[in-house]
Structure formats: structure tokens, C-alpha cells
């Protein structure tokens, strides 16, 4: 809503929280969940106007926004989702990193690394454990599950579209990902919230902080796109940094691929 001067109007309904905030950090995202939780607590405690409804609502005056959850496994490798506290009426945010291959579990006495399929199954188990009691469920998936299988070339499955529709049918309201392989996969769930965040600034900041001897000019550096699909991203980088850009071309043998 806007007032007569074109500024955002103060509407109490816009700042009213949907429900008590809850964050569930799946395996592989524990450190990220702790960072998000500490940032939210500092932001809440350091806010200048503590009289706003957002910061005085029940569920925000807590020591931690993290919700304890786990997916214990049986000896056969099968698992179940468990949420160890009530989430009734909560606005849940579930962090799931399907690329965390450093996580392992025991199956028939052997330690097995978790695949993207295993992480995705655990995500569904936690959503099922909520039992439809939460007010809203949001999934933050830094790397979109099956995002590379986004289109059909022949008799192939459309795994990313199936995943998005499955989460929507399970009651997920919003899906947040970063730099999706093809953001058009959101067409599979046109009535579900889908946020594709492009971390351009964060990548450049991390690069400059890590590589101390980096010289950003045309004589010492250039941007190389790994394929045609990344051209848009790297055109942005080369324009902002003022350097040249090249591209790799993937030549395939279509007699065998």
C-alpha cells in the first residue's frame, strides 16, 4: 500500500507476523541455521522501535528460534522424521542442503554418505512430522534438488518439476533457492511461492576477501563462462568489473550421448 507521497503506507496487517517463527536446520545445515538464528536474535534485540507488533508478538521473545528435529534411522537405512517440540501455529522455515555429501548414516553396519535423494526424503519426513499443524511451511533449499533435470529431451523424467509439485501438495507455501539452473522450473508450481535469489554480490565479496592478491583489470583478469547457460551471469560480472569475457563451448558426440 502507498500513501499520497508515494511512500509505503504503514499498514498494521503488513507487519503482523503470520505465526511464531521457527527454524528447522536439517543435516548439513546446522552451522547455517545457527548463524541465521544468532542474526535474528541480534536484529530483534537491537531494533530501535521495540514497540512494533512484530517484535512484541508472542513467539518472538525467545532465546532461540531453532526447532529441534531429527531423522533417526533404523539398521536397514530407513528413517523417520521427528520434531521434538510443538510447532502448532508456527511459521516454519526448513533449511535443506541436498548437496551436503559429507553427512553419513549407518546402514547394515556400514557408514553410507547421504545422497541428494536421502536429503530430500528427510525433508519430506520433517514436513510430514509437522502433521499440518504449522501455520505455514517455507523451504530454503540453497541448491535446488534435481535442478539440472529441468527439461525433457526425449523419454526422460522431469524430476525438478515433480519435486516442486510434491512439496506444494505437502503444504509448502514458499520455496527459496539460490541461482537455480533454470528458474523457469517455477512454471510447474505457478500458485506456489518460488524465490530464486542470485548471489552476485556475495560471490564477488567472498572472492575479494579470499584472494588478497587479486588484481581486477583487463590486463590481469578475465571472466570465463563454463557454458552457454551461464552467459547471463558472467556478462553481469564482466560488466560490473570492467573486464573481458570468454566462454567454453561443450562439444558433444551425439552418436553416444
Image (cartoon, rainbow, N blue to C red):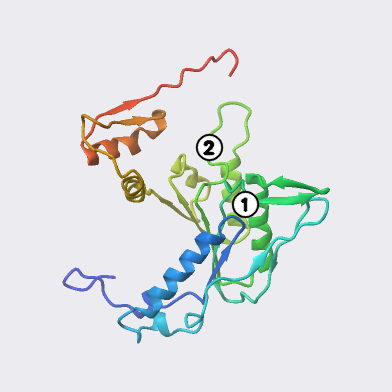
Label 1: few (<14), some or many (≥20) within 10 Å?
some
Q: Please name the residue that numbered disc 2 is placed on.
A: 148
Label 1 or label 2, whichever lies nearer to me, is 2
The residue sitting at 35% across, 80% down in the picture is 12
Is 120 positioned to the left or the right of 148 in the image? right
Q: Nearer the viewer, residue 96 or 8?
A: 96
Please provide percent x and percent y for residue 156: 62, 31
Q: Label 1 to label 2, Cα distance in Å?
A: 17 Å
Query: Which numbered disc covers residue 166?
Result: 1
Seen in the picture, residue 91 relative to 190 is either above or below; the reply is: below
Seen in the picture, residue 22 relative to 199 is either above or below; the reply is: below
Q: Residue furthest left?
A: 5
Please provide percent x and percent y for residue 1: 29, 70
So how many labels did they put on this image? 2
Q: Secondary structure at mark 1?
A: helix
Please provide percent x and percent y for residue 76: 83, 50
Q: Secondary structure at mark 2?
A: loop
Mark 1 and mark 2 lie on one chain; the one further toward the N terminus is 2
Q: Could you say which quadrant of the image residue 52 lies in?
A: bottom left
Q: Could you say which quadrant of the image residue 222 lies in?
A: top left
Query: Which numbered disc covers residue 192?
Result: none
Label 2: few (<14), some or many (≥20) within 10 Å?
few
Amino acid at each position: 500500500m502507498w500513501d499520497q507521497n508515494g511512500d509505503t503506507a504503514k499498514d498494521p496487517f503488513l507487519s503482523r507476523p503470520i505465526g511464531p517463527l521457527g527454524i528447522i536446520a536439517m543435516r548439513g545445515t546446522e552451522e547455517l541455521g545457527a548463524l541465521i538464528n544468532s542474526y535474528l536474535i541480534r536484529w530483534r534485540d537491537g531494533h530501535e522501535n521495540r514497540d512494533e507488533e512484530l517484535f512484541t508478538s508472542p513467539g518472538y521473545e525467545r532465546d532461540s528460534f531453532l526447532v529441534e528435529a531429527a531423522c533417526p534411522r533404523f539398521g536397514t537405512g530407513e528413517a523417520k522424521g521427528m520434531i521434538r517440540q510443538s510447532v502448532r501455529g508456527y511459521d516454519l522455515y526448513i533449511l535443506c542442503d541436498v548437496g551436503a555429501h559429507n553427512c553419513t548414516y549407518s546402514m547394515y553396519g556400514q557408514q553410507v554418505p547421504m545422497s541428494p535423494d536421502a536429503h530430500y526424503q528427510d525433508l519430506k519426513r520433517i514436513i510430514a512430522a509437522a502433521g499440518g499443524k504449522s501455520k505455514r511451511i517455507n523451504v530454503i533449499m540453497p541448491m535446488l534438488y534435481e535442478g539440472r533435470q529441468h527439461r525433457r529431451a526425449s523419454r526422460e523424467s522431469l524430476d525438478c518439476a515433480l519435486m516442486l509439485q510434491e512439496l506444494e501438495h505437502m503444504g509448502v507455501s514458499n520455496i527459496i533457492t539460490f541461482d537455480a539452473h533454470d528458474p523457469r522450473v517455477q512454471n510447474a508450481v505457478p500458485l506456489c511461492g518460488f524465490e530464486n535469489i542470485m548471489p552476485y554480490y556475495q560471490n564477488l565479496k567472498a572472492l575479494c576477501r579470499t584472494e588478497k592478491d587479486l588484481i581486477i583489470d583487463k590486463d590481469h583478469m578475465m571472466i570465463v563462462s563454463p557454458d552457454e547457460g551461464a552467459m547471463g551471469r558472467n556478462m553481469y560480472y564482466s560488466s560490473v568489473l570492467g573486464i573481458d569475457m570468454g566462454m567454453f563451448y561443450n562439444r558433444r558426440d551425439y552418436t553416444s550421448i
